[in-house]
Amino acid sequence: MTDDSADTAELLERARQGDQQALGNLFARHQDRLRRMVQLRLDRRLQGRIDPSDVLQETYFEVCKGLAEYLRNPSMPFFLWLRWLTGKKLQFLHRHHLGTRMRDAGREVSLYRGAWPQASSVSLAAQLLGRSTSPSQAAVRAELQIRIQEALNSMDPIDREVLALRHFEQLSNAETAAVLEIGEAAASNRFVRALKRLRKILLDAPGFFEAPGV
């Protein structure tokens, strides 16, 4: 288990003793990172039907129920445990709403103690491009998104996942290595490789740096 900060340890101890405010403070501290994860990995067919805040609220209920068991055997840092619970909730929602359609779309990647919804090339490209503000800009954005999606799909799936974890979810190298169950050096090397590949993708995409929102 990677060491959490002393402040986190103190709040966890208070939560162990039944202090709900301490647990709420801990969860609130990580909400932005967890929301980024949900936004990145929520199937686009469910956007508008499922709000990321609702996913986080349901995750918090699971945190409250599972905290005692986690504290008996904290096999991962607290944030990664929160992320793991969030991934389980997201996986459940995908299966509940999409059923076999999720399988057909290849929306899971077998990483870190189970299969979790992956960050698709569609989501990654959308994050890179931002939002258009006019019909003409929307047309440019749509063409660029297709080009970038195709290029991202050509990347090694693990490299693409490292890119999602480090660049979009903003996990540390140590956290990324733990999530992927690889060494920190391997995680770092893959991230550098993915960034170089991403840079080439963007440089080869005509008009990318003039696209709205970039």
Image: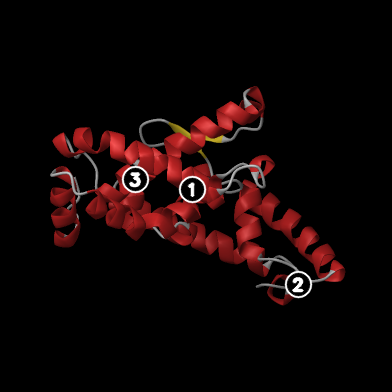
Q: Residue furthest top?
A: 100
- The residue wearing badge 3 is 82
In the image, what residue type sits under mark 3? Leu
**Which label is found at residue 207?**
2
Residue drawn at 72 percent across, 58 percent down: 145
Q: Which quadrant is home to the C terminus?
A: bottom right
Residue drawn at 17 percent across, 39 percent down: 71
In the image, what residue type sits under mark 2? Gly
Give the label, 2 or 3, closer to the camera: 3
Residue 184 image point, x, y percent: 29, 52
Circles 2 and 3 in contact, beta carbons < 8 Å: no
Say whether disc 1 or disc 3 marks the residue closer to the N-terminus. Answer: 3
Residue 122 image point, x, y percent: 66, 50
**121, 116: nearer the viewer:** 116
Say whether disc 1 or disc 2 marks the residue closer to the N-terminus. Answer: 1
Labels in figure, total: 3
Question: In terms of image quadrants, where is residue 6?
Answer: bottom left
Q: How far apart are marks 1 and 2 (CA)?
A: 26 Å
Q: Distance between the residues labelled 1 and 3?
A: 19 Å
Circle 1 packing at 10 Å, graded few (<14), some (14-19), many (20+), is many
**Which label is found at residue 196?**
none
Q: Which element carries disc 2, helix, strand or loop?
A: loop
Residue drawn at 54 percent across, 33 percent down: 93
- The residue wearing badge 1 is 161
**45, 212: nearer the viewer:** 45
Residue 7 in view, yes or no: yes
Residue 11 image point, x, y percent: 18, 55
Q: Residue furthest bottom?
A: 210
